[in-house]
Image (tube, grey):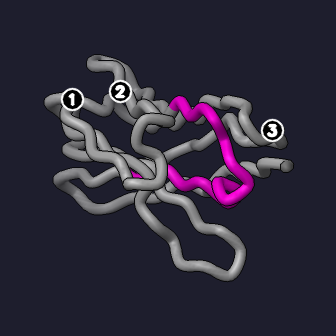
Amino acid sequence: VQLQASGGGLVQAGGSLRLSCEASRDIDSINVMGWYRQAPGKQRELVARISGDGSANYADFVKGRATISRRAGSNLMSLQMSSLKSEDTGVYYCNAGAFDGDFWGQGTLVTVSS
């Protein structure tokens, strides 16, 4: 499956943004979808993930500030983030874990200015 991430950009600290991930096929066929991020000089880390039944997990650093969602019967998954901090800066990647493999999108850059 091919994944197209969008929604990144420059935002001020305390602001909000919504990242979207468009899959090349219906996401009902994808077990788990998630967002990862990679800050400059750091390893890629999990931000949030959501299963096909809608259950979600969040990294401690975004709990209470982020909501991941997926729309059944569609090819869309999104991440709503608020109260952004400078440490949220990084490239955000969409990930899909399906029966036929593990897939990554190209990433979208989020820059939070303080």
Mark 3 element type: strand
Q: Quadrant of residue 15?
A: top right
**Residue at the disc numbered 2:** 70
Give, as a three-letter code, the residue at label 3: Val
Q: Residues within 10 Å of mark 3 (few under 14, many from 20)?
A: some
Closest to the observer, 72 or 9: 9
Does residue 63 show up magenta in the picture? no
Identify whether 72 is placed above or below 61: above
Can you tell which of label 2 and label 3 is closer to the viewer? 3
Looking at the rendered structure, the secondary structure element under dot 1 is: loop
Q: Is residue 23 above or below residue 70?
A: below
Q: Amino acid at mark 2?
A: Arg
From the viewer's perspective, is 68 left or right of 17? left
Kindly check if marks 2 and 1 are in contact, taking CB atoms under 8 A apart as contact.
yes
Q: Which residue is mark 3?
A: 11
Mark 2 or mark 1: which comes first in sequence? 1
Magenta stretch encompasses residue 86: yes
Q: Is residue 28 left or right of residue 68?
A: left
- The spot of residue 12 in percent (x, y) is 82, 38
- Disc 1 residue type (three-letter): Gly
Q: Is residue 13 left or right of residue 69?
A: right
In whole angstroms, how far apart are the C-alphas of marks 2 and 1? 7 Å
Q: Circles 2 and 3: CB distance less than 8 Å?
A: no
Q: Residue at x 61, y 29 (%)?
A: 18
Question: In the image, which residues are magenta?
Answer: 80-95
Residue 55 in which image quadrant: top left
Residue 20 visible within the image: yes
In terms of depth relative to the viewer, which is nearer, 60 or 57?
Answer: 60
At a point 32% along the width and 29% down the height, the residue shown is 26
Whole-Å distance between the Cαs marked 2 and 3? 24 Å
Label 1 belongs to which residue?
54
Is residue 22 at all visible to an observer of this figure?
A: no
